[in-house]
Image (cartoon, helix red, strand yellow):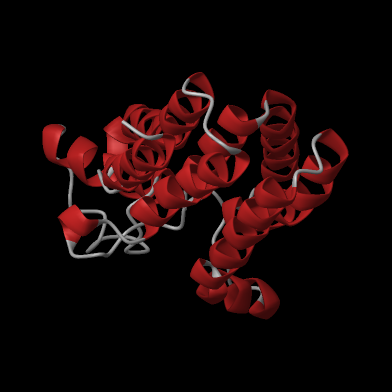
Amino acid sequence: MSIILLSVFVILGAYLLGSISSAILVCRMLGLPDPRSEGSGNPGATNVLRIGGAQGKRAAAITLLGDSLKGLLPMLIAHTLQLAPWAVAATGLAAFLGHLYPVFFGFRGGKGVATALGVQFGLAWPLGLFVAAVWLFLAKVAKISSAAALVSMLLAPFALWLITPEPAFLLMQLSITALLFWRHRRNIRDLLAGTERPIGQ
């Protein structure tokens, strides 16, 4: 098998893995409401926490882990196979796009923060650690998940440039950041209006 064909298979596999919605599956297994029709309507860990009641923390933690692994595992595979930088970058972007637009769930996915973090850890663990630390700090201080996500992902391209200024990786991260801001456009409006809900509400 040629390296090009192998790269295509890995990229396609990353998209399909990304298309598996952890939030929807976890809610089904635990007998919780469909996150697409409750709370914010977003199939992600924050909304699972919001609608999960007594099981919220456990359900959100499992969802967060599942969504992160969707980004991490394809990147580890791409690195193990020693794919070219463009293919590694495309793999990460494909996993992220799978979460945003999952083929298995009518192309209606989440906002991608956890999957993006998994991609970042798989690309370069210092990048993932930096983004996670910024998110955790801001989430603790501001107690607003979307604000923490937006700021941490906005800083991610600059951190990546300092770690590894590979053009393909920078383009991937810039694309992820831009898409993540687009998916958070409603949250941005709410933040500007002062009506964004804190974590857990």
Q: Say whether residue 126 is left or right of residue 179.
A: right
Numbered marks: total: 0
Relative vertical location of residue 72 with respect to residue 89 in this rendering, above or below: above
In the rendering, at what x and y percent does residue 6 appear? 36, 35
Residue 32 image-quadrant placement = top left
Residue occupying the far front of the picture? 2
Relative vertical location of residue 13 with respect to residue 149 in this rendering, above or below: above
Q: Say whether residue 158 is left or right of residue 33.
A: right
- Front in this rendered view, residue 80 or 38: 80
In the rendering, at what x and y percent does residue 92 appear? 50, 44
Residue 6 visible in the current orientation: yes
Relative vertical location of residue 132 with respect to residue 169 in this rendering, above or below: above
Q: Residue at x 58, y 51 (%)?
A: 145
Q: Residue at x 28, y 49 (%)?
A: 19
In the rendering, at what x and y percent does residue 103 appear? 21, 58
- Front in this rendered view, residue 116 or 185: 116
Residue occupying the far right of the picture? 162
- Front in this rendered view, residue 85 or 52: 85
Q: Residue at x 19, y 39 (%)?
A: 25
- Position of the N terminus, as image quadrant, is top left
In the rendering, at what x and y percent does residue 175 appear? 60, 61
Residue 52 visible in the current orientation: no
Q: Residue at x 29, y 33 (%)?
A: 54
Q: Say whether residue 28 is left or right of residue 158.
A: left
